[in-house]
Amino acid sequence: MTKHLWTDLAQTAGSRQADRRDEFGPEVEAAIAELRARHGLDDGPNAAPVADPGDPRLVDTLRSTLRDMVPGVNRRGFLQLTGASAVFGLAGCWHQDPDTIVPYREQPEGTTLGKPVWWSSVLRDSGRPLPVTVKTYDGRPIKLEGNPDDPHGRGRLDARTQAALLNLYDPDRAQTGPLRKQGGAALATLSWDDLDKLVGEALKTGNVGLITGPIDGPASRQLIEDLVGAFGGRLKHAAFEAFAQDTAIEARRLCFGPNAAKPPVYHAERAAVMLCLGSDFIGGGHTGLYEAVGFGEQRKLQGVGAKAEMGQLICFEPMLSQTGMSADVRVRARMSEMAGIAWAIAAEVADKLGKGRKLPAGAVPGTFAGTVVVGTKEVETTDDHGHASKRRENIQQSAITFAAEQLVAANKAGKTSLVYVGGATHGGANSLALYVAANYLNALLGNEGVTVETASVPASAIPASAEATLAVLGSCETLIIAGANPAYSLPGAAAALKKAKLVVVLADRVDETFAAASTAVLAPSLHGLESWGDAEPRAGVFAVQQPCIAPLWDARAAEESLMAFVVAGGFAPKHFQQTKASGPDPRQVAVVTRTLLWQAAAKGVQSWRGYVLAAWLKTVKPASGSPADERTFWNSALARGVVTAAVTAKPVAVGFDDAAVDKAKAELPASGGFELVLSASRSLHDGAWANNAWLQELPDPVSKVTWDNYVSASPADFAAIIAALGVDPDRQGYDTPYKNPLARLKVGTAEVLLPVHFQEGQQPGTLEVFFGWGRAAGQVCTGAGAGEASDTERLGVNAFDLLGQGRQAWGRVAKLEAANGNRYRLAVTQGRNLLEGMESGPEGKVTRSEAIAPDDVLSEHRKDARHLLRGHAHEPLNATGTDGQPHGSRQGGNLSMWHGAHIYPGRRWGMVIDLNSCTGCGACIVACSAENNVPVVGRDQVRIGREMHWMRIDRYFSSGDDDRQGNERQFLDVEAVSQPMVCQQCLNAPCEEVCPATATMHNEEGINVQVYNRCIGTRYCSNNCPYKVRRFNFYEYSKYRTGPQNSGDPFNRIAKNLVTEHTTSGREELTRAPLAMMLNPAVTVRSKGVMEKCNFCVQRTRDVRETEKASGKPYADGSVTTACAQTCPTAAITFGDINDPYSAVSQTALAALHGFKVLDKDLNTRPSVLYTRRVRNRPLRADDTVVDAKAH
Amino acid sequence: MRPTLAELENPITLIHHSVRSRDVTKDVTAPIFRAPNLTWWGGLLISLLMLMSMWLTFAVQMCEGIGILGLNKPVMWGSYITNFVFWIGIGHAGTLISAILFLFRQRWRTSINRSAEAMTIFAVATAGLFPLIHTGRPWLDFWLFPYPNDRGPLWPQFRSPLMWDVFAISTYGTTSVIFWYLGLIPDFATVRDRCTNKFQRMAYSLAAFGWRGTAKDWNHYERAYAQFAWISTPLVLSVHSTVSFDFAVAKVPGWHTTIFPPYFVAGAIFGGFGMVVFLLAPMRSMLKLEKYITINHLELCNKIILATSMIVGYAYTMEFVAAWFSESPWERNQFIYRMTGGHAWVFWTMFLCNVVSPQFFWSKRVRRSLMAMFIISIFVNIGMWFERANIFMLSLERDHITANWRMWVGTKFDWIVVVGSFGWFMFLFLLFCRTMPTVAIAEIKAVLSDPAGTGSGDHGGHGSHGHGSDAGKESPAHG
């Protein structure tokens, strides 16, 4: 109607103007002609005759014409002006900076405006390569996804590689070209030519050490070999990684001979029973996406009813790890007991397998008292009054016997198992005995060559080694450090760097290694998305790394820098000559013609791209057996990103050498303090990407702590610490404005101050600290987002400092002393919530867990999959459950004020989330942040509960211990569930009814969408959302990089900023170039005061329709998915059209008899998200049956 | 002639019998023509500082975002909404006094109705700030009003209780202002007639709308007044019921309950009378109106406080019973949390202030002691603020999904605004005291026992023998 009105108005206005033109036409034209004549503008021969300039009539006409055109101050004009000024005044209230849009003069070939272009490439996370596809808009990468052609990654991606995008746009990268540092002098810039000359000179004499990250990929390896060859032995190369697997490789060498001395590859998907010994398979270090994919398969529940099957996971561990949270049976044990446990299990396994197997002579099975519940029995008890009653009690069994039985049972059933030891915690020599024991077990059970093997290790790989790195660092005058940061993560490296004559650092920023050296140059290197390269993630899988964006800063690929240095030094390595095949690449030329950059072609050397191409044509093409010509092969390799070749080496079982046991005697740590375990951070890993705000704000899967390092203490030890501080433990509730006690951790001579975190499930007497923090490589990791300025306010300490020279990640004795009175508030996204943590009368724990995240035991699940799910309906996922429809077992019917639900006749989007395979890793959170421009809010804001993650992972603990009141034991033997929580897209959405502005509503495909520009921010919707999935922009979060600084004291900040920067936000906290380039143009950037939330990636689902229209082909199931479902390493999330009964999501939902919708049975919200509950493959416990009895 | 204390405390005297019509005019208008004393200036300055700090906080909030307040993920409504409901509640006593007591012919209302109505207006003016300023983008608040617009056109969503609020409050505010002003017209005329200053006279002439005091004027006036009383009466019940729907309609455990409308109304009247006593006790001596606002009036107010205190006490108890009876684990947990959780002090402050402290009014001495009632009225006000906080914040702190549980912690800005809202209210009230007749002159004259000074008639006003004396005993029942 309004539109109509506007049209009419326009017509009216138009006709009136036409009238006026008619009325004054001749005069106006005459006036214009007169003006033209005066200014000497000739209209040519056809110009109208010039009127007499002195004609008074003409002057009057001109005046009246001008009056008509200039708004005078009459009543109407005044009102117009007032209205306009009010409007413009209001417009001034918008905090939107003008941006310049530069349109294409000519449209680049192959691009459609507004449509993304996908490239394939490969990125490395701590040396491990992952093939990716890169979504780019107008030449800007905006999202990374896994490469579906990668046979091991299957199109999925982990959290850190998802976050790698942010590293590309990190404003803290070196932006000004090479830097030089000499003695105590200030940093000086120098040109690339000078740099090359300087390094070239240094390379001419003396020993040269080259430290890189782990290398694989034919071209990369060939480059290293070329360099080593060209120097005639004067150049020593070592690959370094923070968690180098020296000990694991050494153990394999001892046990299986030198041929097997490689970092092993694990296949969890092939293991019916998995045993983790003090190691975190998922979160802890050496394993990555590929292992997570396999792990997800192991955890998945297959089959229905009595045929339901799933892998079993048994964990022995001192700290609660991510794997421990996923475990079916978790046994607490100290790290120092672990080798003994392994041998004890081995002894029982050998015994049970029979056939005369005996433990190797030197093996010492430990004594371990831990037990596992293996069943229940009924006992008669008599109470105080003499009444007899029956009660179920647990039957306990030795944990060692239980584990051995499970392993042997699998073996006897012809299945394989996997005994896993590894990760950051087992890097030091004192883990050697444990590795040997694990190797023995794997060999004994026939796992060697099946679930653990080295045949998949790429031929081109140069594995990382800390020992070799230290040796190189200590013996060379000139050091080139490319893509490694030993000064930060290798104890002893900093001293060696100080002694070197020249340290050449090839890194994307000034890092600890550059800072540690006395004389150093920094050759800024490119991000993986800006440069060429290659990788071989697994044997026979080759991936090519191609640039997807022109270099953002004055930087050069590390490989190119190496080549430039070598050429400048006068060397001529074997493959450097320019060949015809590698003619100049126009794109590369565009990049390198920046005047200062080294141009390979100018030196008669082939470019790094040409080098990669030549190496691929030489190695990969024949291996792949491709019959195509070279150009076609290369083009298809670039397009697909991955080339697979037949693997010649087959996994073979190898014999275990009993002599290894004697060579690997463990030195048990001295007693008299806490046993310290240093683990890899589950979000930051080794800290290489610590400046990544997405990762800093990613809650730890176990502790839910963000932004900070901390020391985890078991409940009893935590109570002791706070008792020492004189704090009443009861007041340290999980949701009070909680401040962690600060404690001094003393290890050897090192002493650090860390906040203490109460960690459920941790073995008393052990402490855990994480690597990855304490870096000084940018504003994010040095705590730019700090809220309270004080000496304790920094992003954790560097746990590598605690390693000591032997790099023992466990086995060091630590003392923990409460630092007097000081507290520190960790930014935790979720407090200490037990699943049944609600005291609610007689039925207590049952109702709670049943409504949110119920779990089950496999044996019960086989009998009845809907065991304990009585109130939850099992119906098609798209059932509306209105009064008119049958609603099966829905409790309480469907009481509703509104008659008849809205039916979505077309598509309706829905999701199934499998809690069994969710490991809580958080890849979905990062993917969602990247896809949906979700801002980072910073530590301060997380502390007060304002994180903006659209997707969060709730973590619940449940405890078999009935004594739940004031007893720390309830927090020890906990079972955990990780529950990804997205907007449930309720059919009866509570948020929609209460929004006064109609800012949230359903779209025609069943998605509850949020209309940002309608939202005025009453926040009522969030209050009424039982899932609390809505996020509010309390500040202009999109403006800040690490959250609004000093948000607790805006007065001072505003005053300061207004004076210095004429804006309310300081320059240092504003997100400007180049971070804005990272934003997904398909998603609105939200301003302050606006509510936002998960909308099932509505931009992607809208694309479906456009594609349908453009291509004429109907949408095919699976052709669109949300960012979270797309990336999930364990494939826990299925997304699709739930109106289509044949879609994967409908089928999954229908088959999932153990599915439930959160709170639906109590609140009748009718979500479109179905969860399939966690099923634990463990024996029944007494409290499982008790719960069952209460539920009915 | 100042009345003796004994006379003032004579329970059967509505207005002191010595008061004559001319005294009324003189006494009530005196503060308008008298230079304000230091106490008034001091009070004005303090309240000005308080309200300025509130407005400064609003300015910072506009620049920075509502993040300066202590809101977080589960607790999206904090001190602002608490202030809003608190102040809306305060307003109720005024309407009750001016409308319902008028209709029930409670003649004792005449002494206090003017100031109680003023209190209503200022309380609504204070309350009205908060729903507007609490939004994330206050500059777009006008989108809440249904008017033809170019956004679609997009109408507000009428199923949202916030929309009901918009209408409830704007209706209430408008009606209250008109009703109040209507009563003021004859009195403005009185002031006008006594003005000696030219500008003052001009201003009051405008305000008096040309009132001449003719029979026709009075006829119209009385009719209109009665009609507005009828219009206002349902509003006493409806406004706070509507406000309570914001919560009762929502799914939050602790909000989702049908007891809220009557409970909120009772609480509003309770809090409102607390505020009446809090204001009148000092005002009557400050403006020397002891003859008009006698201790009897205040005692009657105290009786209403006592009665409504027991109603809210009952409501508090019933909430617990309902939670227990509901068998809803969330409801039960919510109420256990209120009593024992980290914010249990909020609950217990509320309980002590609202249920326990008014019990002292059972004693007649306390009821008639100015100091005691002043202190208790402060407790009532504190208690009512915490009652709102208890309902809003504590419920949100513990909702359905345990992973979301988090506590609300106010920042300094929250508390500046809480204090500042009192400053804003006091500022307006202090201005009112000096510019308008604080007692309804015309109405008072109608209840004088001896308006012409003939010395007859000690009991009640003319035409209503015994009524005034009964009022003191019966009025709580009417309230």
Image (tube, coloured by chain):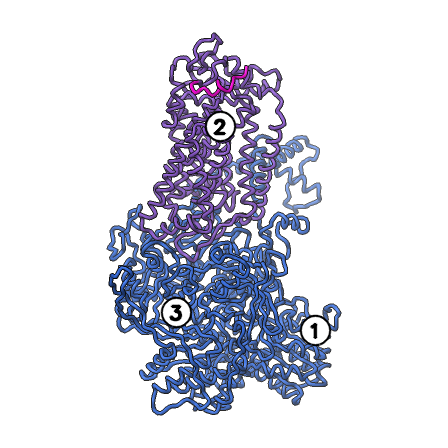
Chain colours: A blue, B purple
Pair 2/1: label in front: 2
Name the spot of residue A1016 as percent of width and height, x first: 48, 46
Q: Which residue is mark 3?
A: A917
Q: Position of residue A126 (x, y in %)?
A: 54, 74
The chain holding disc 1 is: A
> Above or below — where is A490 with respect to A23?
below
Q: Hey, which quadrant is residue A92 in on the image?
A: top right
Q: Amino acid at mark 2?
A: Ser
Query: From which residue to which does the magenta span run?
Result: B1-12
- Mark 3 vs mark 1, foreground winner is 3
3 and 1 marks on the same chain: yes
Camera-side residue: A901 or B297?
A: B297
Task: Identify the residue position indicated by label 2 in the image.
Answer: B369
Mark 3 near mark 2, Cβ–Cβ under 8 Å?
no
Q: Quadrant of the C terminus of chain B?
A: top left
- Given contact means CB atoms under 8 Å apart, are the residues at marks 3 and 1 in contact? no
Q: Residue furthest front?
A: A385
- Name the magenta segment's main secondary structure: loop
Disc 3/disc 2 C-alpha distance (Å) = 71 Å
Chain at tag 2: B
How many residues crowd around disc 2 within 10 Å: few (fewer than 14), some, or many (20 or more)?
Answer: some
